[in-house]
Amino acid sequence: MTLNEFNKLDMRDGMETVNQFGTFIHNYYDDEERCNLFAIDMFFVEVAYHNNHNRIKEIRAFRYGHRLDRYSNLSI
């Protein structure tokens, strides 16, 4: 699957794809949200959750950039 194909999926199908094909990398927490980072093929998927609710807020797919930077200083 390519990044463009993934971005065309709705949230339900995107989460199904993450659950089937994603490799968990790490998680990140801040005051606003909790995020889990996954790798799929040649791109990353960040699943963001509301801090106050246990619900998915957004699924973000990317190859590189500032979203990936927040994980770069974490020890794995």
Image: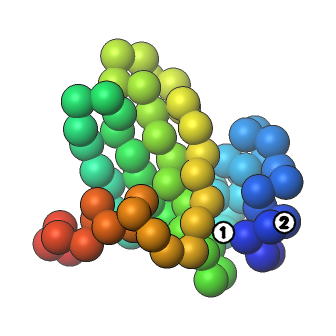
Disc number placed over residue 21 in the picture, else none = 1
Q: Is residue 12 above or below residue 38?
A: above
The answer to whether 46 appears left or right of 4 in the picture is left
Looking at this view, name the residue that lies furthest to the top.
Answer: 52
Question: Which badge, 1 or 2, comes first in the chain's sequence?
Answer: 2
Tell me residue 54's x, y (percent): 44, 23
Q: Helix or strand or loop: what does disc 2 sit on?
A: helix
Q: Quadrant of residue 50?
A: top left
Q: Tell which tag, 1 or 2, sits nearer the viewer.
A: 2
Which kind of residue does numbered mark 1 sit on? Phe
Q: Dot 2 corresponds to which residue?
A: 5
User: Residue 70: which disc?
Assistant: none
Judge from the rendering whether residue 27 lies leftward or rightward of residue 23; answer left or right: left
Residue at 56% from the left image edge and 74% from the top image edge:
63
Quarter of the image where the N terminus is located: bottom right
Q: Quadrant of the C terminus?
A: bottom left
Q: Residue at x 41, y 52 (%)?
A: 36
Disc 1 to disc 2, C-alpha distance: 14 Å
Dot 1: few (<14), some (14–19), or many (≥20) neighbours within 10 Å?
some
Q: Is residue 53 visible?
A: yes
Q: Which one is nearer the viewer's eye here, 29 or 12?
A: 29
> Residue 7: horizontal and vertical position, in percent?
76, 57
Task: Decide: few, some or many residues near mark 2? Use Cα within 10 Å; few <14, some 14-19, many ≥20.
Answer: few
Is residue 22 found left or right of 26 in the rendered image? right
Please report the residue visible at 60 percent of the width from the left and 46 percent of the height from the top: 59
Position in image of residue 6 (x %, y %): 77, 61
Residue 24 in sight here: no
Instruction: Give the answer, above or below, for where 31 lies relative to 2.
Output: above
Q: At label 2, which amino acid type do we have?
A: Glu
